[in-house]
Image (cartoon, helix red, strand yellow):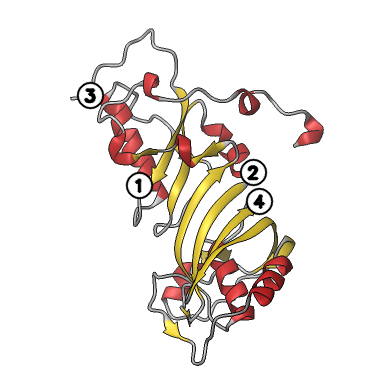
Amino acid sequence: HPQQPQQDQPPLSGILVIDKPYAMTSMTVCSSVRARLRRGGAPKRVKVGHGGTLDPLATGVLVVLVGKATPLCNAIMEGQKEYLAGIDLSATSPTDDLESEPVPVPGAAPPNTDTLNEVCARFIGTIQQRPPAHSAVKIGGERSYARARRGETIEPEPRPVRIDAIDIVSLDWPVLTLRVVSGKGVYIRSLARDMGRELTGGGVLVSLRRTRVGAFDESMAVGLDDLPRVMTSDDLLPVPAHLARPRPADDR
């Protein structure tokens, strides 16, 4: 049974840095945190949000905000992100990841180091990126993935996004592993598709781990199963000072 809330408790406010498990939605993580807080006496409608969604098949840093901290979601989304991405260069897929069956690209062969470096360099900076057809982008007032699942051919409009760095970690054919540092709104699936198209004609995102969001990195992240079943404000991190202070008007 949930504990009775104590009247003298200050309103809940804080942050959790979660290592999101594979095959779980970001909202399911938030629901799990909410249930644990409610067992600890939090109000039924305690607000729980996150600072930038991760696809179900991705793992890694998900910043969860609780109570009075939830308005900071947007400030955290603005922060720089860092990813470790595995890209299969020998295939394509309708969803640009393993949510759909990969289709082999005939004759795909490993690119040489010079070509790899040249293509990586072309994708650094502000680029025009087309979101995946299977994404939450709205087209005509409806989510793109809903239309794509009905069999419609969907081409979301390209939009400007910022890529700060792309480092080659390894090429263990057919999988190219990259470290990517980016701004907000970047689809790593789209980056995999577009870079792969230039390298081999393939490009399926086969693994994705987010290792950092702003100042929150994976060394701070806690597995969902490692959280206590009953949580209170004592289990939350305080809001960092750089997020808590209001930004000057010209900085917004």
Between 14 and 90, the one lying in front of the other is 90
Q: Position of residue 212 (x, y in %)?
A: 54, 44
Task: Say whether residue 141 is visible.
Answer: no
Q: Residue furthest front?
A: 113
Q: Residues within 10 Å of mark 4 (few under 14, many from 20)?
A: some
Q: How far apart are marks 4 and 3 (CA)?
A: 40 Å
Mark 2 residue type: Glu
Pointer 4 or 1: first along the chain: 1
Residue that badge 3 annotates: 2
Decide: is 9 above or below 27.
above
Q: What element carries label 4?
A: loop
Frontmost residue, 31 versus 105 = 105
Q: In this figure, which residue is indicated by the disc labeled 1?
A: 28
Residue designated by label 2: 78
At x 47%, y 37%, the residue is: 219
Mark 1 or 3, which is nearer the eye?
A: 1
Dot 3: within a 10 Å radius of its alpha carbon, few (fewer than 14), some, or many (20 or more) residues? some
Q: What element carries label 1?
A: helix
Label 2–label 1 contact, CB within 8 A: no
Q: Residue type at mark 4?
A: Gly
The mark closer to the camera, 4 or 2, is: 4
Among numbered discs 4 and 2, the one appearing first in the sequence: 2
Q: How many labels does the image show?
A: 4
Marks 1 and 3, how far apart at CA: 20 Å
